[in-house]
Image: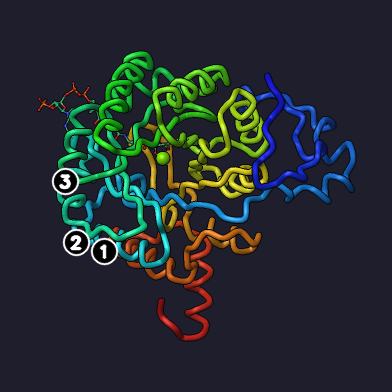
Amino acid sequence: MSETQIPPHAERVSQARSPAQAPAQGREQVVDHTAGPGAAAPSEWFKHMFDALPHDVDIYEVGPRDGLQNEKTVLPVETKLAMIESLVDAGIRRIEITSFVNPRWIPALADHMEVATRLRRREGVRYSALVPNMRGLDSATRAGMDEIAIFMAASETHNRKNINKSTHKALETYTEVVREARDRGMAVRGYLSCVYGCPYEDQVPYENVEYVSKALVDLGVYELSLGDTIGVGTPRQVAGILQGLLGAGLSYDQLAVHFHDTRGTALANTTVALQLGIRTIDSSLGGLGGCPYAPGASGNVATEDVVYLLNGMGIRSGVELDRLPAISVEIGAKLGRELPSKYTKAYVGACAKQGVQV
Ligand code: HMG
Ligand code: MG
């Protein structure tokens, strides 16, 4: 494996910063903690631990898609449109609005055509939607999408359960979809699910992750989002996998991270990804989310929790943090439950103390 690349915006990164670890093979891997950078030279490590942090990041908002796809309460189109518009008002500039998948598989997004055609597009905002096959691409084209996202897993069983295809067949299908989408002038993003573990196969060998990642990038996706679909990843594993992929030739600009917070590790994982120089973070308003074909999967990391983290670390996202809780509370009320975002809980509590309603 070649030397991990230095993030372009952080030339001063020291050797001591890089975790000396091969890609993690799974959750039960025995880790040699004495090999960590802190153990070797704590003072050097502390000096440099934030050197690679980006100055700016893109938040890629998945609330209207990943967030709503698994909800039993199907929100009316007007509510979805208002949610998307409010998020854009708050400064979100990349947003996944729906999925052009079989509505029998994902009933909560069966209104994909109406959402996409009725949405008022704003200058400077990139709107995207999931597409699983040529039929989905044709629908996305009719709906006026100029960006789509294809998706598959590093696990064979998850691919069969989620998109009814083998890994091989999915890559074959997407070869045509990506070629055709690009010919139609669309940008194509890619998702790789089950990077840190699979609900059906448990551990996913790193080799599978690297193989499918490279294959998707070779097809022409401009960015690959690495999904912790069932929220099992931990920071050392994140560092290992990112370093593995960067060492295998993928670049910082091609990688995004997508953490579900099922076991409470999503913000820790996000921090490590930032420390390694990753500049696109997927998140979902209020922590909504979950894949219906990943039993036990719960919400994505909450957008407001990520923005709070970024603000505290001096990283710009362009999102106005204090506009998010009101949107979260409203969508939660429409779904009949409080959304899991910690920032919104704290914000609502602080407002209540002052007698202010969010
Ligand atoms: P299939 O049943 O194998 O499709 O589904 P098929 O080609 O055999 O066709 C069967 C029927 O589906 C036909 O209808 C097609 O027309 C229809 P019929 O003739 O029986 O009436 N069909 C479609 N209808 C609308 N739009 C389409 C479409 N394609 C076929 N695009 C398919 C294959 C992929 C479509 C199906 O498995 C599906 O829709 N899966 C949805 C999976 C999904 O959306 N999962 C959640 C998103 S993934 C995720 O959440 C993870 C992620 O967040 C990252 C992470 O967290 O790791 C991205
Ligand atoms: Mg997801």
Q: Looking at the image, tell me whether mark 3 or mark 1 is earlier in sequence order.
A: 1
For the residue pair 192 and 266, the one nearer the viewer reads as: 192
Residue type of the residue flagged with mark 2: Glu
Q: Secondary structure at mark 3?
A: helix
Q: Secondary structure at mark 1?
A: helix
Instruction: Give the image quadrant in which the ligand numbered 1 is located.
Output: top left
Q: Secondary structure at mark 2?
A: helix
Residue type of the residue flagged with mark 3: Met
Dots 3 and 1: beta carbons under 8 Å? no
Dots 2 and 1: beta carbons under 8 Å? yes
- Please give the residue where the numbered disc 2 appears in the rendered image: 78
Q: Looking at the image, tell me whether mark 3 or mark 2 is earlier in sequence order.
A: 2
Instruction: Give the percent coordinates (x, y) of residue 213.
Output: 49, 25
Q: Is mark 2 within 8 Å of ligand 1?
A: no
Which quarter of the figure has residue 294?
A: top left
Mark 3 and mark 2: span between their CA atoms? 13 Å
Q: Is mark 3 within 8 Å of ligand 1?
A: no
Characterize the local packing of mark 2: few (<14), some (14-19) or many (20 or more) Cα atoms within 10 angstroms.
Answer: few
Say whether residue 257 is left or right of residue 18: left
- Please give the residue where the numbered disc 3 appears in the rendered image: 113
Characterize the local packing of mark 1: few (<14), some (14-19) or many (20 or more) Cα atoms within 10 angstroms.
Answer: some
Q: Is mark 1 within 8 Å of ligand 2?
A: no
Instruction: Give the percent coordinates (x, y) of residue 219.
Output: 39, 23
- Please give the residue where the numbered disc 1 appears in the rendered image: 82
